Amino acid sequence: MRPERLKNLLERLQQGELSIADVLDQLRRAPFEDLGFARIDHHRSMRQGYPEVVYCPGKTVDQVVTICARIAAGGDGVLATRADDAVLRRLEREHPGIEINDLARTAYLPPAEPIAAAVRGNVLIVTAGTSDLPVAEEAAVAARAMGNPVRRLDDVGVAGIHRLFAGQEELREAAVIIVVAGMEAALASVVGGLVPAPVIAVPTSVGYGASFNGLSALLGLLNSCAPGVTVVNIDNGFGAAAAATRINRRSGPQG
């Protein structure tokens, strides 16, 4: 339950539009709901500004669907990540209006009321190549679900660096930049040397044998010569979006 939603409940109680029983019914699940196989953190929105996100691998289809249904019932929307096709198709059938992104492997049901977070500006997601798009799409979906305006600058890797320079206006205007790159992941260092905005680098598992499924990109980014580049784990677009959101917000969820 988001703070503004709780405030609305209390105001409606004060105005006589809801009874105490009505409010108690909506608060009954607080602070978490025990499903036996999962304990849903319904107060995540109050602490962090957005609901608990459902990571799908390792869960059965029924478990994912049940968790998503209980989170969505609160009206705050729900985001599921790394969902396989069976999960995506089931969620698509059961939730009219849910946004399915097969490339990102995400399912996003927008909240009943848009998240009204005060942010500093755009989150710009920059990709080195088309092969990095699945991770970038995950970052874009998650960042938007967390209340950020999202812009994109795709396929601007260092093999054709003039493509990056053509997007300097977008780079200058961004409040936070997420750079998604595989191979040697040099793009994040280049971007970090061009802009004053915080840069969050996401190494991807794109590359030939010696890339070691993204380990080379990760080590390269951890040794970036551009000061201040922050690095998340391999292929972790969601983690980059969560970090960008915390940077981009002008205040905490109670602000």
Image: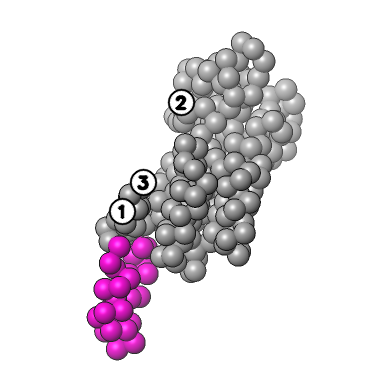
Nearer to us of marks 1 and 2 is 1
Crowd band around label 1 with a 10 angstrom C-alpha radius: few (<14), some (14–19), many (20+): few
Query: What secondary structure do most residues of the magenta stretch adopt?
Result: helix
Q: Looking at the rendered structure, which numbered label has been put on residue 34?
A: 1
N-terminal label among 1 and 2? 1
Q: Name the residue under label 3.
A: 37
Cα distance between the residues tagged 1 and 2: 44 Å
User: Is 83 above or below relative to 43?
Assistant: above
Residue type at mark 2: give it. Pro
Nearer to us of marks 2 and 3 is 3
Residue type at mark 1: give it. Asp
Residue type at mark 3: give it. Phe
What's the residue at 59%, 36% (across, down)?
Answer: 135
Quarter occupied by residue 20: bottom left
Q: Give SS at disc 1.
A: strand
Cα distance between the residues tagged 1 and 3: 8 Å
User: Is 41 above or below relative to 181?
Assistant: below
Tell me, yes or no, if residue 91 can be seen here. Answer: yes
Percent across and percent down for residue 53 are 44, 48
Cα distance between the residues tagged 2 and 3: 44 Å
